[in-house]
Image (cartoon, rainbow, N blue to C red):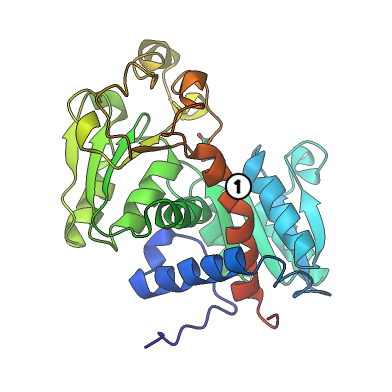
Amino acid sequence: MEPDIDFVGRDVVSIRDFKRDDLEHILKAFDDLEKHRGSLDGALKGKLVALLFFEPSTRTYSSFQIAAERLGMTVTGFAGPTGSSITKGETLHDTVKMFEGYGADVFVIRHAKMGAARFASEITDVPVINAGDGSREHPTQAMLDLCTMKKAFGKIDGLRVGMLGDLRFGRASSSLAYALSNFDVEITFIAPEALQMRQEVIHFLKQRGVTPRRESTLEKVAEDLDVLYVTRIQKERIPDPTEYERVRRIYEVNLEALKEAKPSLKVFHPLPRVDELATDVDETIHAQYLEQAAAGLPLRMALLNLVVGGGR
Ligand code: NCD
């Protein structure tokens, strides 16, 4: 039986707030939209979305913008701190209250500070979607990652997922790990000690019955994996620049690194990539990251439609 889930008015601040039924509901909404492209075009006509991006973004901003426009929404806000009153010192509180006064039906917020989206959700009754804050949360990225996995493999249960790179400071990897903990998966965190996954994430996974493996190199696990989720070293979040220089070239995923991999292995990356994923992987059957980025559009359309409601 279909679970009776109502998303209207719901905040999407942390992927930890979403249980398996919720995620299945989102996966289905995504799948329906993939099967019936155009079915949500214009569905939220007359609604207003405020995109408040206090931190730079390419994919997340533009996919939310295009998604909202396809839904027929009016889009307001800003794509980065320059050009907005933040440079004059305007607070997040005042910015949210102002757009609330303009009649925003939903906020989409990206911010460098952890907890910014949660704070915003507490000062307004308008639903808030977190488009990435600090080094902890990026729930819509995790949702689109799940959608892409389901599309590539037809299932999520049973997958062996390795996450590689900057797991300590990257919000995409921790959010995905939280999301995957709702499924029957094997997770391996592949990183040097300085960039290994934070204890609080490991603790949360164990509480949900998933005990992740930890490895320091890809070599040891490459042949076992179905998904290799590669992430960028978060230069802007690493407190020590010399540490950045030390770790930046340690993990380069290239053809050589994938030679033991199963033919069915899919390589994911939330993008942008820097040194950690060689372009020669693009031409292989393993590359999944462009499809992954493309999934951001239907996922964000489906999600806005669920949260704002009143559509189809
Ligand atoms: C990620 C982010 O902003 O956290 N990018 C994205 O949204 N696709 C990953 C990153 O910046 O490394």
Question: Up-down: is 157 above or below 250?
Answer: below
Q: Position of residue 19 (x, y in %)?
A: 35, 70
Task: Tell whether 60 sits left or right of 223.
Answer: right
Residue drawn at x 61%, y 71% is 127
Rendered-image quadrant of the N terminus: bottom left
Task: Tell whether 250 sits left or right of 57.
Answer: left
Task: Tell whether 196 sits left or right of 12.
Answer: left
Question: Up-down: is 247 above or below 309?
Answer: above
Residue drawn at x 46%, y 34% is 287
For residue 11, say whether it is visible: no
For residue 305, say whether it is visible: yes
Disc 1 target residue:
294
Q: Nearer the viewer, residue 170 or 160?
A: 160
Rendered-image quadrant of the C terminus: bottom right
- Secondary element under disc 1, as helix, strand or loop, is helix
Residue drawn at x 65%, y 58% is 108
Task: Tell whether 20 sits left or right of 26.
Answer: left
Q: Nearer the viewer, residue 154 or 56?
A: 154
Task: Name the kind of residue labelled 1 in the image.
Answer: Ala
Q: Position of residue 283 (x, y in %)?
A: 51, 26
Q: Position of residue 139 (x, y in %)?
A: 48, 55
Question: Up-down: is 226 above or below 244?
Answer: below
